[in-house]
Image: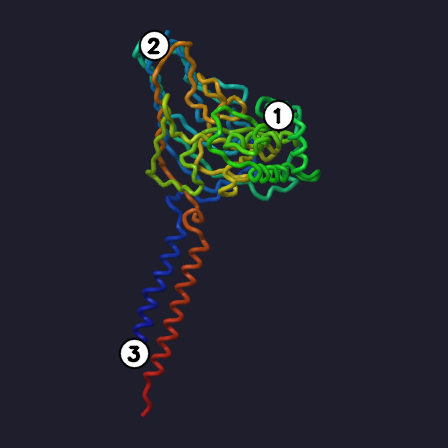
Amino acid sequence: MKAKYTLIFLYLFIFPSMNSIAVSLLSPVNASIAYPRLSIPNDGVSNYNITQSVTYEVVINFTLTHKSGTGDFFFKFAKLNNRMPNSPLTQYCPPYQESELKYSKISGNILTQTIIGDNDEFNNTYDSFNASLSIDESVKFDQTYEITLNAISFQDIDDAEIGTYNTSDEIFELYCNDPEPYYERDDSSLISRSDSIVSIGDNPIEKAEKIYNWVSNYLTYNEDMPSQEIGALAAYNQQQGDCSEFSSLMVTLLRIQGIPARKVTGFLISNDPSTRPKAGNSWTFSVNQLDTNILGHAWVEYYVPDVGWIACDPTWHQSANYFNRIDFLRFNLNVGANIFFPPLGIVSEFVNPIFGYMQGDTFDYDYNVKITVVESNLTPEDSFPIFVVIFIVTGLGVILLAIIILLRRGSKKGIVSY
């Protein structure tokens, strides 16, 4: 009888515990949207899945105080653009970044301003204004965004789903046809190398994957690279670089194959791909004339007709597979070649803030970004590895079975015949 009650206890306690453990481990964190969300072909964009997303509040505060000189300044700030299929600024772009400007204010002696924004040839958008400051007078620029970053992946694209390139359209003019500084597509050594990586019968995605893998394995990451951009050819010759060089080399090798490609720049909340933001998490970053802790980053997008701009990160491939996928840890600022940081006059993978000034002026400035997670929608597999759940549940089942067998053997030994 004692053995019987023991079995009943085990049944009532262990089985519900196993079930609750499995359910809790498999349940998504803060998930309110069903994932994956499959793409609906529109605006020349298709074949992508949104696997998870995180919504952030991004608060930007910039202050500059004039110390000496004329005090005439020109300010130019890259906007955190809405990057969506139906956006006129981001044609053929999947919904990498859903952005809404909630608040924007300039204070100080402002002469002219264009707070709505102006665009460059790549449709990057900037807020720009002029200011004339007396000694110890300041200008302030404050903005608040709500931004949803979608983790997007492209998988299993058939040849029949890939359209035909139009080599005379604007995409080729901007991102493929001509050599330019840092993207030396006419260099014979780079042409030879690009041709050796791919095969004649490869479609654009197959070529991109081979080039992506080759760049990730060929270059050695060097976090001590100079701030000045060195470009694809120098990275190829030196066999090293940071994220900017990884991206420049991949872009150039793709362009040699007739595949439009571009560098994307912005900043990260973390350089650890395993980071899983939760509602309420926050990060604070700053730039001043002495120091910065902002995690500037660069990655790649290449264009496939009828599919759209496909994101890759050849630098992070050394930690995880980032071919034809991107995560929710990076804020998009700029695409294309206009990536610089005046007044130093250098090309940089981080563009915010930008401001020009009269020679001889001195000033103090602070640029601060606070990022807070508003909502986090993580898929179950990002909350806990499924193989671990299976292992735990299977192990508990084996233990329970062993206990039952031992109890049954014990009860048989306790039987006495008269």
Which is nearer the eye, 137 or 37?
Answer: 137
Residue on which disc 3 sits: 1
* Looking at the image, residue 279 lies above or below residue 352: below
The residue wearing badge 1 is 184
Foreground disc of the pair 3, 1? 1
The amino acid on which the numbered mark 1 sits, given as a three-letter code, is: Glu
Q: Secondary structure at mark 3?
A: loop
Q: CA distance from mark 1 to mark 2?
A: 42 Å
Inspect the image, locate mark 3, and give the three-letter code of the amino acid beneath it.
Met
Q: How many marks on residues?
A: 3
Q: Quadrant of residue 342?
A: top left
Q: Name the foreground residue: 35 vs 243.
A: 243
Residue that lies at the very extreme toward the right in this rendered image: 200
Q: Is residue 127 visible?
A: no
Q: Which residue is mark 2?
A: 68
* Disc 2 crowd, CA 10 A, few/some/many (<14, 14-19, 20+): some
N-terminal label among 3 and 2: 3
Instruction: Provide residue 345's location: percent of width, then percent of height.
Output: 48, 17
Task: Please identify the residue farthest to the top as the structure is shown.
Answer: 70
Q: Secondary structure at mark 1?
A: loop
For the residue pair 149 and 264, the one nearer the viewer reads as 264
